[in-house]
Every structure is written in C-alpha cells, then in structure tokens.
Amino acid sequence: MTRTAMQADAHTASLFDDHADPAASAPLQLEPGAAVLRGFALAQVQSLQQDLQAVLAAAPLRHLVTPGGRTMSVAMSNCGALGWVSDASGYRYTPTDPLCGQRWPAMPASFRALAVAAAARAGYEGFAPDACLVNRYAPGARLSLHQDRDERRLGQPIVSVSLGLPAVFLWGGPQRGDRTRRVPLAHGDVVVWGGPARLHFHGVMPLAEGEHPFMGACRINLTFRCAG
Ligand code: MD3
Ligand code: FE
C-alpha cells in the first residue's frame, strides 16, 4: 500500500470510529466535570425516536409558564418517576403529569441505557436517573441563562442528549454575570455535566430555521437527572 493510501485509510478509520463506535472516541472535557461525547447517541437514534413518540403520546409536549408569568418558548414533557414542571407557584418535580393527574410515562429502557452508558463513559459509574425532561425547540425557541438546582442530589451529574437540528449552547460559570462560551451541539451529541460544572449557568441560543432529515424542523433535548 502506498503511503498516501495508508493515510487516507487511517483518516477514514478515525472518522468511522467516532460515529460507529462511540465508546472509542475520547470525551472532550469542556472543563472539570463537563464532558462532551460527540455522536455518542447516533447508533441508538432510531429506538430513541420510536420510544420518544410513545412517551409524547402519553404525556404531550406543552409550553409551561414561569413563576414570573412568561410562557416558555421551549415545549416540554417528562418521563420517569419524576417530572419537572413550572407554573405560577414555582419550579418543582412531581410524580404525576398536571395535565391528566396520572403518573408520567415510564422511562424507556433505551433512554436509561444510553444515559447510564454515557455517564459511565464520563467517569460516573452507577448513574440512576429517576427523571427525564424532554425539551422540544422549534425554530426561534430558546432557553435563557439559568441554573439547574431543583434536584435533590446535586452530587449526581445531568446527562443531556441532543437530537435533530443543531443548537448553540451557552456555557457560563457559577455566577450569572460570568462570561459565556458558545458550544455547538449536534444530532447525537451527549453531554455529561457533573462535579464543579453541575451548578454553572447555561442556556440555549434561539434555534435557527432548518429541516433535519431524521427529526424534522425541530431539536429535541433529553436531560436525565437524579431529582428525588
Ligand atoms: C449544565 N436544557 O433542560 S442541555 C435544561 O439543550 C437545559 O435543552 C438545555 O438546560 C437544552 O435545564 C441544555 C445541557 C445541560 C443540561 C443541564 C445542565 C447543561 C447543564 C445542568 C447543569 C449544568
Ligand atoms: Fe438547564
């Protein structure tokens, strides 16, 4: 084999590894506690998408209202033992869907397995999420800078899975006024947020217009948490 052919081969192999064998690609550390696993969910997107449809049939996406009275542009739902909700009285985790009074749909095995594998890959063995928040962004939807501090066990990480249209994630520091970095998140990317990064401020820039071949004109983000 010529030298050029070998180089081309090696290049193809590394591209292939990143996408087909996510366990082989080293996590990118944003900072201590925050690891980006590019494409980690790609091999599972078909089952995730199917199971998501069933979750959303039982617990439809809805636009929650903040305690301040604003309707969120992101549509949300939940699965698992606990679900995150917001209304005039505040933010909290509930065992039932306020729309119907029934328990949230169970967390699909495909969701749980992916979240547990991603956490382990980032160094968190034995991650046992009891809540999965589903966020759906249509073009223009955004999430303003906030902290996630409604969970009981802040020592546990949050695992987030991005599907569909790409987004620009805003990554700040422990104080609201800290400068922010922009981190692009694409279809199939998984991020594990723990340690000192767990309480950092973060948000999502308004979603750009687009059509994703697999997910349509939207971005879905799944976040797995230990809430109770
Ligand atoms: C960093 N969701 O649901 S995922 C949220 O893309 C949320 O829908 C965004 O922020 C989304 O609360 C961002 C990445 C993420 C999720 C939770 C975090 C980053 C985090 C918690 C602590 C630190
Ligand atoms: Fe958040």
Image (cartoon, rainbow, N blue to C red):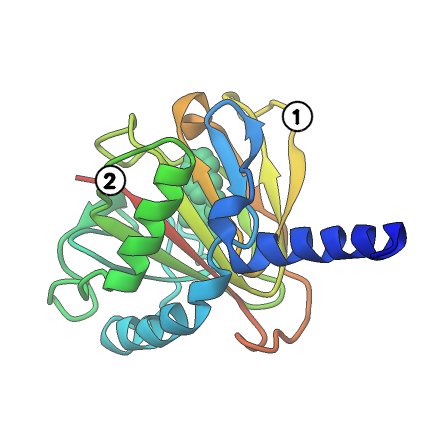
Q: Are marks 2 and 1 in contact (CB under 8 Å)?
A: no
The structure residue drawn at horizontal position 26% and vertical position 39%, both measured from the top left corner, is 127
Residue 91 in picture, x, y percent from top left:
29, 44
- Residue with the mark numbered 1: 179
Horizontally, residue 220 falls left or right of residue 4, namely left
Horizontally, residue 216 falls left or right of residue 130, namely right
> Would residue 124 be seen by someone viewing this image from the given angle?
yes
The structure residue drawn at horizontal position 44% and vertical position 21%, both measured from the top left corner, is 196
Question: 11 or 56: which is nearer to us?
Answer: 11
Q: For the residue labelled by badge 1, is the local secondary structure a helix, a strand or a loop? A: loop
Question: 37 or 71: which is nearer to us?
Answer: 37
Q: Is residue 88 above or below residue 141?
A: above
Q: Quadrant of residue 5?
A: bottom right
The structure residue drawn at horizontal position 21% and vertical position 68%, both measured from the top left corner, is 99
The structure residue drawn at horizontal position 64% and vertical position 42%, both measured from the top left corner, is 183
Between the C-alphas of marks 2 and 1, the distance is 28 Å
> Would residue 85 be seen by someone viewing this image from the given angle?
no
Q: Amino acid at mark 2?
A: Cys
Indicate the quadrant containing the C terminus: top left, top right, bottom left or bottom right: top left
Residue farthest to the left? 102
Residue 223 in picture, x, y percent from top left:
38, 50
- Residue with the mark numbered 2: 226
Horizontally, residue 4 falls left or right of residue 208, namely right
Residue 46 in picture, x, y percent from top left:
43, 73
Indicate the quadrant containing the N terminus: top left, top right, bottom left or bottom right: bottom right
